[in-house]
Amino acid sequence: MHARKTRRALIAGGAFAATIALALAGCTPAAPSGPVEISWLVISNDNEVGTSQALADAFTAANPDITINIETRPAGGDGDNIIKTRLATGEMTDVFTYNSGSLFQALAPEKNLVPLTEAETGNVVETFLPGVSVGDTVYGVPMGTAMGGGVLYNIPIYEELGLSVPKTWDDFISNSEAIKAAGKTAIIQTYKDTWTSQLFVLGDFANVLASEPSWADKYTANEVKYATDDAARAGFEHLQEAFDKGLLNADFGSATLDDGLRMVATGEGAQYPMLTFAIGNIAGTYPDNVNDVGFFALPGESAGENPLTTWLSDGVYIAATTEGAKLEAAKKFLAYIASVESCEVQTSASVATGPYFVKGCTLPDDVPQGVKDLLPYFATATSAYPALEFLSPIKGPALEQITVAVGSGITSAADGAAQYDVDVEKQAQQLGLPGW
Amino acid sequence: MTSLVENNAIAPNEPTPKGSKPRRSGSSYPFWFFLIPGIIFAVLFFAPTFASFYFSLTRWTLFTTTFIGFDNFALFFREPNLFQGLINTGIYATVTSGLKVVLGMGLAVLLTSQIVARGWLRSVVFFPVLVSTIGVGITFSVLMHPIDGLINQTLAFFGIQGPFWLTDPAWALLSVALVDVWKGVGLATVIYIAGIASIPQDYFEAARVDGAGPWSVFRSIIVPLARPATVTVIILSLIGGLRSFDLIWSMTRGGPGFVSDVIASVIYKQYQAGFYGLSTAGNVILFLLVTAIILPLSWFLNRKVAD
């Protein structure tokens, strides 16, 4: 009895103290008292780390009591692994940068992330929000710029051979054969970095959507498949065709992203299917050649609109384990990232490689040639479509191995597409989607 | 990791000399003395092992689990890219184990004979065992680069077009297996040297008196009497081959495509993809596979030794 009474008294006392604390918290302004340190996990790529550090420094300059410590993680599958494990074990950094779209959806945001309010996301362009939201709740702010997935090409080679930007897949192949006949590498592939092999498939999605606007919804509902849909399977077939016709660089199996960028920038190769963020890497590594690199969307079967497949930028999120003063500081930092000032810091730290997703942000006039080629696609609604991973939560994790196998002539396009359908089924079941 | 497990595995395979049977009765240690390691073993080994049996029957997102029976196992045997890993594991273990036995015994015979700089050569052969596996993997993937790599450049000097070691589907798994042999043959050699050195000199002298040549000595004395060493080498390298991961991951990541995937890299990729239940099922399969191969093999080989 005595013990229970004591405990009850303790609970009452605790509740009273908590009430006081809450009341006090309500009275005091939101500014965190004393210096606060928050940690930020970013991808270990020179460009990314440099930009992140510039943002952190600029933010600390404006808020001297908040320090931001940057940690790095690898890109690709290893990075996904680290993010998921750290979230699941409650050891995530306070703030972290990660993909938007289907990879974001796989993080179980309702459980692992802090929902944001108008205070942080007020400046964010509406088109970005679905990529970092579950239902109506927003969890992230954009970092970096929109990207296009298409072909980086070496302009001097195109001029030398009198070629023009292709509007159809057949044009692309005939250009490539002309380049090959001139004794140059027509298409660059870099399968040592396996993810780079996915561009022919993922970057072709705008052409799929142009032919069937509701394809993504049907895909999520398990009504269409890559193997049985001609438009969707085309990406796999293009990959196989490039290999079968001998258009690839000889070392495609062992080349890396950096090799590929060197080749397209210096004219060792003519065309490299890639995301436009890589223009920033070229600007950093080969500043003299950056304006030799142009960009066009992956062409489809018919000329038509010739639309571009676009990617949202990465998001910056707050882990649910962040609390108290750190949470306040983290929210303040996210609001800063989604501000015009932040865009300016990012542009001066690296190179803007596309439009920002923050209202009021503009691009300088001296952007690289590839970015100049990219911007017109965003000008009209029918010339740019989001990649599948932003319209459907399903993305099979083995796609990059399958596309390497198809692109190396190990697997046929039809088999590769069928394998990917099986891979996707696992992901859909894991996400608990209806209809799978 | 590898060396720890291997060191533990050596002990039970070493033949116990006759007559030195450990005393069972009247242990000088009290019960509680065994209880503490028993508890540690149960907590760190039994509990996770049995938990993994359960999780292999679920669809597990780390946040929630759904019981789905044997679906994960069915998937493992149904999906060609997963099943390929099982087959490759068998090929990889057999190739590395076989080559280590042959080369290890050959080197041991050479290094127990009277040759110049024997001690130095022994060190050289053993040295790769000490180097970090990831370091070896990265070094060899540079050496085996199809165009700029030292190996193919050397071959080109002699007018030979070397294969695309790590990117040619026909070569990738074999190339990694060869590097594994290069790295692991030192351990096999040392085991064989010990085995050969323990053969009494009388046999060699008797053979010499009878006029036996080096080949007969090798075939009739060294091979049969070094059998315990062969057993140890086969079992160690088979276990190592079946659960090999680090070298393959650092050299090819199972690629190109899936051609050099082994079961351990398949498990890792499923884990990376967030298919934790499927990944755990792969681990259970690996556990059963290793047990199913090693237990009878160990019994069979050791029984022959005892005869």
Image (cartoon, rainbow, N blue to C red):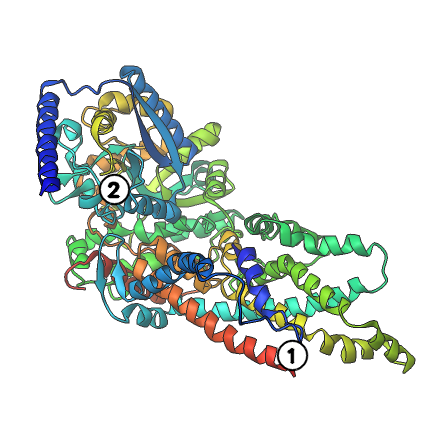
Quarter of the image for the C terminus of chain B: give it. bottom right
A383 left or right of B268 in image:
left
Say few, some or many: other residues with alpha carbon within 10 Å of mark 1 (under 14 / 14 to 19 / 20 or more).
Answer: some
* Badge 1 amino acid: Val
B255 left or right of B119 in image:
left
B244 left or right of A207 in image:
right
Q: Chain of mark 1?
A: B
Question: Which disc is residue B193 wearing?
Answer: none
Residue A226 seen anywhere in this rendered image of the structure = no
Q: Nearer the viewer, residue B205 or B26?
A: B26
Cβ–Cβ below 8 Å for labels 1 and 2?
no
Looking at the rendered structure, the secondary structure element under dot 1 is: helix
Tell me which corner region of the image, top left, top right, bottom left or bottom right, holds residue A427. Answer: bottom left
Q: Residue at x 50, y 50 (%)?
A: A249
Q: Residue at x 27, y 24 (%)?
A: A343
Position of residue B210 relative to residue A186, above or below, is below
Relative image position of residue B254 (x, y in whole percent): 46, 59
Say few, some or many: other residues with alpha carbon within 10 Å of mark 2 (under 14 / 14 to 19 / 20 or more).
Answer: many
Question: Which disc is residue A100 wearing?
Answer: 2
